[in-house]
Image (spheres, rainbow, N blue to C red):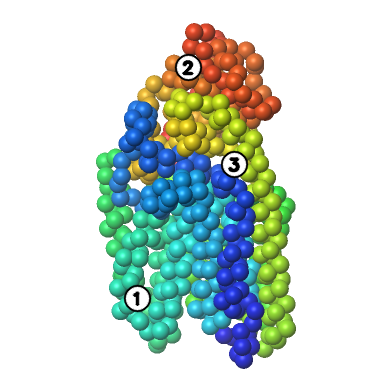
Amino acid sequence: MQGENTDGLRWWQTRTFVIVAALLSMVPLLWPDIPPLVDLPGHMGRYRVQLAIADNPWLGDWYSFQWSLIGNLGIDLLIIPLAPIFGLELAVKLIVLTIPPLIVTGLLWIAREVHGRIPATALFALPLAYCFPFHFGFVNFALSMGLALNLFALWLRLARLGHYRLRAALFVPLSCALWVCHTFGWGVLGVLAFSAEMIRQHDAGHRWFRAWVRAGIGCLPLALPMGLMIFWRSGDHVTGVTTDWFNWRAKIEWMVMIFRDRWQDFDIASVAILLVILIKGLRDPNIEYSRNLGLSALFLLLVYLLLPRIVFGSAYADMRLMPFVVAIAVIALRPKRGLSIRGASTLALFGLAFFLVRTAGTTVSFWLYDQSYDRELKALDHLPRGARLVSFVGQNCHNDWFMSRLEHVPALALERKLAYTNDQWSMPGAQLLVTRYAIAKGFAHDPSQIVTLAQCPREWWRPIGRSLARFPRDAFDYVWLIIPPAYDPALEAGLDLVWTNGHSKLFRIDHSKAGPPLAPDVAKPPPPSGTAS
């Protein structure tokens, strides 16, 4: 590798370091019983329906669950063998625990294949294992990206060893399996493999146009999922629009938010450190970009710029890619020949310190989220099995940096108590579960669980007063308020308090008592929402 001592491996280039880094990346997830990722509790509710609907017929009155071949089945499939062994919650935690190590090992393996040895600069990319899309709970997506990075490293290794036929044979089934995990991972693998093949063909003496054509031919083993994609999206049952193209303001915001978690200054400062590293690759005479990974990063950046915000009804499509654009750009950097061993070691120590500080911050943040989960989930001790529950989670109209991670906590009532909850996504074709509880009307699915103090511009969320006054009481037995905005106590008419922690409340609906007077409802019912992984 350029710029490194060829007499022996440095500490950051050894297998021991890769293993230790992978294990360190798991630390933030070790303490919480449930990984505190925004959408994950909602997915866990779906997993429970998947596993329990055959033995609990009332679930079939509320939800429709049918297996189909879609590009979003990663954890949905993995919990089938694991849940009977570990229980659903531990099985989900164990699967999610593998995602950061997959991302870390994938990035380091790619760097080693491209540069010959892991460059000191690659350590700065490791904290991106806990990027904003992962915090948001896009778990099938994140799992597919971890797999895609490792598969790309394998693609590079087989090419380096000249095993092209073996590579073609292996990647036909591997690409299909990756697509089933999540379409996004398969797409990113295709972009990375194509750009790497272009460079390889050009270095073999082909001009750029011919290299482009030969790269396309070389990537044909990855193409079979295109047929699966057409089959998936052509069904009559498929819903979900693709819209919000070229939202430049949002795209700039996603660049700043790649570490978004709890402390805005800390997260933005971390982004600034990566920006400094990337700029040094352009200006510092001791650091350069690999042509291979540099082109990969440029291709991914182009995809990011062209992607709309919503694809097939799934929101934040472009946001999900941005951290991996940065990660590939960072591991594309390497010290030039002439940089001393001491200089490379100093750079590696700074990268390790960055990784450790980010990991420590995420560990504390997740511990705090876990405390909030424990406080709210005590309500479920007072909820009977199979209850019909409507939940309202407080939110504000500002896009605060800090996200409570409570938006889909109501789904844990479905997961633990087999209760009905109104926070499930309902988008045929995007996921396997569809809400069918008609008498719940506009309070049947996400985002009906989100409530605010007043009507928010450009949002389908209802004010808390309107939700409490107008939800169909005959459809539900219990009301769960999770840190709600202030509201008129008169709206509690007909509700008997059974639990409170001082901020949140669980009520039993007394159907023999009248509810509050109805106010005019000027809000439209929320449409099916799609932010899930």
Q: Which residue is mark 3?
A: 405
Q: Kindly indicate whether the residue at mark 2 contacts the one at mark 3 (C-beta within 8 angstroms).
A: no
Specify the label residue 386 is tagged with.
Answer: none
Decide: few, some or many residues near mark 3? Use Cα within 10 Å; few <14, some 14-19, many ≥20.
many
Position in image of residue 306 (x %, y %): 46, 57
**Which quadrant would the N terminus be assigned to in this image?**
bottom right
Q: Quadrant of residue 373?
A: top right
Q: Which residue is mark 1?
A: 167
Disc with the residue nearer the chain's start (3 vs 2)? 3
Q: CA distance from mark 1 to mark 3?
A: 41 Å
Q: Kindly indicate whether the residue at mark 3 contacts the one at mark 1 (C-beta within 8 angstroms).
A: no
Decide: few, some or many residues near mark 1? Use Cα within 10 Å; few <14, some 14-19, many ≥20.
some
Q: Judging from the image, what secondary structure is the residue with disc 2 in?
A: helix
Residue type for callout 1: Arg
Identify which residue is drawn at 38% across, 49% down.
80
Q: Which residue is mark 2?
A: 473
Position in image of residue 365 (x %, y %): 67, 49
Residue type for callout 3: Arg
Q: Judging from the image, what secondary structure is the residue with disc 1 in?
A: helix
Q: Foreground: 205 or 514?
A: 514
Decide: few, some or many residues near mark 2? Use Cα within 10 Å; few <14, some 14-19, many ≥20.
many
Q: Foreground: 250 or 398?
A: 398
Position in image of residue 481 (x %, y %): 59, 26
Q: Judging from the image, what secondary structure is the residue with disc 3 in?
A: loop
Residue 191 appearing in the image:
no
Disc with the residue nearer the chain's start (1 vs 3)? 1
